[in-house]
Structure formats: C-alpha cells, structure tokens
Image: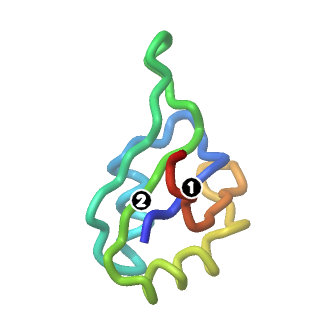
Amino acid sequence: MNIYVGNLNYRVKEADLQQVMEDYGEVTSCKVIIDRETGRSKGFGFVEMDDDAAATKAIAELNGAEYEGRTMVLKEARPRD
C-alpha cells in the first residue's frame, strides 16, 4: 500500500520517516518530496508498505499524531492521474 504522509516538519528526512513507519512493518520505499528550486522539503512524502494490514494500522494510529512539533496526516495515496 502506498501511504501519503502530510504536514511533516520541514526538517524531517527520509530516514526519520522510515524509522517511524518501520514500527508498524517493513517499509519498501520512503520518499520525502523536495522542492526542485529551493532544495527544501515540501512537508509531505510517500511510504510504500507491502503488508496492507500493517499499513492500515499505521494510518489508523499515526493519523493525527504529533511528530517533530506537527500533527501528521496519513491516508492511502491516490494513484497519479
């Protein structure tokens, strides 16, 4: 399952996000989206987990949780158009 993770602190790196998500299961990929012009985080990212049950549990428990001073938003990512 591909998970959208929003409202991240701009200092959060991919390794930080991956570590948080690995508490719920194996992470196959983790990407924090970076602005091309400034090189700064855009405050959101995507995490891929193969185990749908673990991904669903992560969404349920982390959505609305505070991390690095911000309230995270997690939901199943929509496919690109």
Q: Amino acid at mark 1?
A: Val
Dividing the image into 4 quarters, which one contains the N terminus? bottom left
Q: Which residue is mark 1?
A: 5
Q: Is residue 30 above or below residue 35?
A: below
Label 1 crowding class (10 Å Cα cut-off): few <14, some 14-19, many 20+? many
- Disc 2, SS: strand
**Residue appearing at x 62%, y 63% in the figure:** 74
Looking at the image, which is closer to me, 48 or 62?
48
Q: Left of 60 or right of it: where is 51?
A: left
**Residue at the disc numbered 2:** 47
Amino acid type, label 2? Val
Q: CA distance from mark 1 to mark 2?
A: 7 Å
Tell me if label 1 and label 2 are in contact, CB under 8 Å: yes
Q: Nearer the viewer, residue 13 or 78?
A: 78
Q: Nearer the viewer, residue 1 or 47?
A: 1
Give percent across and percent down for residue 39. Answer: 44, 18
